[in-house]
Image (cartoon, rainbow, N blue to C red):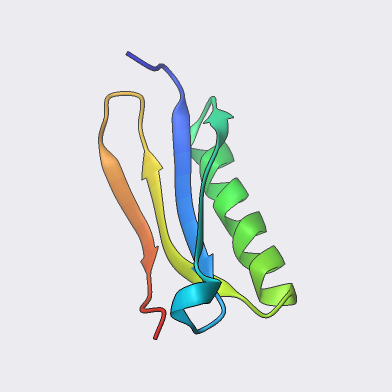
Amino acid sequence: MNKKWILEHGCHRGTLTSRDTAVSEYFDTREESYQAYLNHRDFYRSIGYQIWYAYIHSPDGTQELLESNSYL
């Protein structure tokens, strides 16, 4: 079992073809993974994108939804 926190997220610019997804590196704490989410969100906004979805996966496998938005 993985002992790290994982950030999974997607972004878009308002169209079906502008969607992209990523799984971020592993983090030691929930706070680190949440801060990475905030950093990604701010970066995407700066280039005209928005978060499509964002989840944090805990070391025990629990998934926490941080944000969810339609891409249309």
Using the image, determine if residue 46 lies above or below residue 60.
below
Q: Position of residue 33 (x, y in %)?
A: 53, 41
Residue at the far front in the pictured view: 17
Residue at the far right in the pictured view: 46
Q: Position of residue 53 (x, y in %)?
A: 40, 63
Horizontal side of 41 relative to 60 (left or right) equals right
Name which quarter of the figure residue 70 lies in: bottom left
How many labels, in total?
A: 0
Horizontal side of 68 relative to 4 (left or right) equals left
Residue that appears at 25% across and 36% down: 62
Q: Quadrant of the N terminus?
A: top left
The residue closer to the viewer here, 28 or 13, is 13
Residue that appears at 74% across and 75% down: 46
Horizontal side of 2 relative to 11 (left or right) equals left
Residue at the far top in the pictured view: 1
Name which quarter of the figure residue 5 lies in: top left
Name which quarter of the figure residue 32 lies in: top right
Q: Position of residue 7 (x, y in %)?
A: 48, 43
Residue that appears at 32% across and 55% down: 65
Q: Quadrant of the C terminus?
A: bottom left
Using the image, determine if residue 26 lies above or below residue 24.
above
Using the image, determine if residue 57 lies above or below residue 49.
above
The residue closer to the viewer here, 26 or 29, is 26
